[in-house]
Amino acid sequence: MVTIYDIARLSGVSKSTVSRVISNHPYVSTETKSKVIKVMQEHNYVTNSLAKQFRQKQTKCIAILIPDLNHPYFSQLVSYISADCYKSGFKTVVHQTFLDKNIEREVYNQLQKNEYDALILTSSTLPEVEIAEYTGNKIIVACNEDFRGDYFDVFCLNEEEVTMKATSYLLSKGFTKLGFCSDNISSPLQQARLKGFILAHNKKGLKHNKDFLFNDISNIEDGIILGKRLFRDNLEIEGIIAGSDFVAAGLIRSAIRNNIQIPQHLSIVGFDNHPISLVTNPQISTICNHIQDMSNDLVNHIVNKINGGVKQSPIKKVYNGEFINRNSS
């Protein structure tokens, strides 16, 4: 492969002169410029834009780390973040970890090698302190997950508080046998939701049923299968925090197949206020998570950090979710 040194040698000029020609520097004679360009064309020389960006200390690229793009929530989140990054002049690279710690660590390694200007972390299998050890002083901003924010900036929903509100609503209707769905119970986000679910019971002087905690439930198909199990085994569940609107839609579909009336026989609360919550029958009671506001705020923040405009200690911005009561509860 022809290098800039080869172009300089073949043109009979210095490397710095070739660099000036490439950057269209004004202090190069027309004759010299023409000679260098001719040699470049003859040898199909293409400038290494990535190397140039590294020298400028910016790649204009931001990495987004997610567990699975097929997950409805994360696909929506990536869509908003990517659009906001594009508006700010940055490309995005999406890495799916599939909850594999080795894949996650490799992305942190790429950040350390300056392959990206920054990393947006939407979910992690690692503790915050370990992530900080891998990323060092590089720019990393977490969103979605409820990290403490001791080592890097965090933008997240108050999952505990809003889940407690939704659970309290079901309990106030006299339902004491409630279920709880999570897609990955080990994550900080799901732990916060579970804490809110349990706190709502405690405030009513009730105990939650551990047999009604369902993990690895994340999409419509999972909701259908879970519903089939609930109705087949005649589990005495009166209400359920479904974890997502897609899971709730699956539960409703399963209920219809089994002649179960919603909410008369089972009250369902989804999560995320996704448009799908408006097209089911009945419409899904859900939780609005302000995903669009969060995306816009964190991208503005991270771009300011990249451009050197933010110097303070890590910040944590928490958004208050809203319980939206529709016909499924």
Image (cartoon, helix red, strand yellow):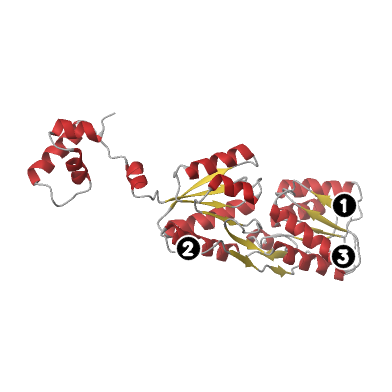
Residue occupying image coordinates x 70% and y 50%: 187
Kindly indicate the quadrant of the structure image that contains residue 145: bottom right
Find disc 3 in the rendering and name its residue: 202
Residue 10 lies in quadrant? top left
Circle nearer the viewer, 3 or 2:
2
Work out whether residue 272 can be spotted: yes
The amino acid beneath tag 1 is Lys
Q: How many other residues sit within 10 Å of disc 1, few (<14), some (14-19) or many (≥20)?
A: few
Is 277 in front, or is 8? Answer: 8
Q: Which residue is mark 2?
A: 311
Q: Nearer the viewer, mark 2 or mark 1?
A: 2
Q: Give the image quarter of residue 15.
A: top left
Of pointers 2 and 1, the one earlier in the residue sequence: 1
- Which residue is label 1 attached to? 210
In terms of sequence position, does the residue under pointer 3 or pointer 2 come before the other? 3
Residue at the spot x=74%, y=55% of the render? 191
Q: Residue furthest left?
A: 31
Mark 3 lies on a secondary structure that is helix
Placement of 145 over or under 113, stated as above or below: below
- Distance between mark 3 and mark 2 Cα atoms: 42 Å
